[in-house]
Image (spheres, rainbow, N blue to C red):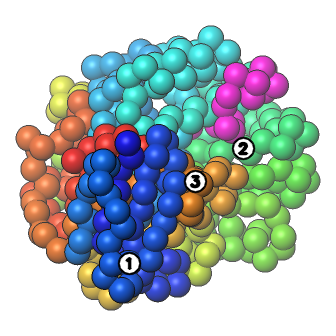
Amino acid sequence: MGIWILNGQTVAADNTVTKKHFYIENDKIAQVVDAVDGSLPDTSGHEVIDAAGKLVAPGFIDMHVHLREPGFEHKENIATGTRSAARGGFTTIACMPNTRPVIDTVDTVNYILDKAATEGVVRVLPYGCITKNELGRELTDFAALKEAGVIGYTDDGVGVQSAQMMKDAMALAASMGMPIIAHCEDNTLVEGAPVTDGAFAKKHGLKGIPNESEAIHVGRDVLLAEATGVHYHVCHVSTEQSVRLIRHAKQFGIKVTAEVCPHHLVLSDEDIPGMDANWKMNPPLRTPRDVEAVIEALEDGTIDIIVTDHAPHSEEEKEKGMHLAPFGILGFETAFPLLYTKFVKTGKWTLGFLINRMTQKPAEVFGLPYGTLAEGSAADLTIVDLDTEREVLKEEIVSRSKNTPFIGWKLQGWPVVTMASGKVVWS
Ligand code: DOR
Ligand code: ZN
Ligand code: ZN
């Protein structure tokens, strides 16, 4: 017995809309039938999900998330984090290694993969650290980590401060056909600054995080990527200067790709209502000019994909205030509704464009066989109600943490059914 998903609207990257039926058998999309003439397949003996009037998209892919396990289970764990992902329509997520211990050994990779297989509800792909303990001093065993199943190397949470260390990492990763994923931040430029160097910092007398702290690493690293031939992927691009450098590097044929987060597309530092740490993340909300630049960069292909940087922190931690609270906000559960409401509803983007940057494009960038509704592919599907406006309610958040600036926002485009590997994991 399988599952029929009937009469769903699908939308291609070029925004062509087609009505389709999908037959799911085990963990695969076994059959895709055009529903143009209104005819129905024989569903007898099978489960049926009625998707009439709804969008059926490939399960969303999020290449940058923090699941906090092991070590910070009071913020999130693999069970709660993957459920939060499922509520947001994500079926494949790539988790960052800044856990405790960090993911710098085969044992920790195995721990994550075992937990994900037994307690997770969506596919979890781990990154391994570039340097041991993310301290920037000594490279990890790239070959052993690859063998254990990591999909790339990153010290996300901190920048790799030494150019020589980064160059060695890139050369090694390149020799193994693996990507380097970089959190770009020069520590000497950011110390003690909780928000961007902009209007909000000025108004509240705060030290600001300057745009160069990010862009200096981007500039350094595209040159190192050119020298080593590695696939270099830039995390959470937030500044106009980074955009310029990436655009230039791409024109030059350097193998660089980049990601942007919903909050950097939707919010600037001028939207921060006050000294509330639910608006504190790293990189910080930048100036309106930077927001325009990252939007344009996503639109013109300079930035390839959308990721959430889902970064749960407990209420206690966030209540410590703008100065002392840790950086980071939740991402999974608001990402699609937020972008649908702000960019598709307003006519700035097509639905096909948004879906593409959250499914097919990330799969392409990282060489993953997901992000497609083609026959024979993994049965990862997200059914979305595009019509009902709903408020973001704190009590409905599935993540163990609640740190988001979007509570109270009225949004449209809510995932109503998420299927991962043929199983309904959210409805
Ligand atoms: O906002 C952030 N949160 N930025 C980071 O670089 C790390 C992340 C986290 O782990 O909380
Ligand atoms: Zn980061
Ligand atoms: Zn991150």
Count of residue discs: 3
Measure the C-alpha gap from mark 3 to mark 1. 20 Å
- Please tell me which residue is depicted at 82% across the width and 25% down the height of the picture: 143
> Which one is nearer the viewer's eye here, 259 or 28?
28
**Which residue does the numbered mark 3 point to in the structure image?**
377
Region of the chain picked out in magenta, as a range:
141-156
Q: Amino acid at mark 2?
A: Ile
Q: Amino acid at mark 3?
A: Ser
- Please tell me which residue is depicted at 82% across the width and 57% down the height of the picture: 223
Q: Residues within 10 Å of mark 1 (few under 14, many from 20)?
A: some
Percent from the top left, x then y, of residue 204?
A: 23, 54
User: Is label 2 or label 3 in front?
Assistant: 3
**Which residue does the numbered mark 2 point to in the structure image?**
180
**Residue 348: quadrant of the picture:** bottom left
> Which one is nearer the viewer's eye here, 79 or 3?
3
N-term-proximal mark, 2 vs 3: 2
* Residue 35 image label: 1
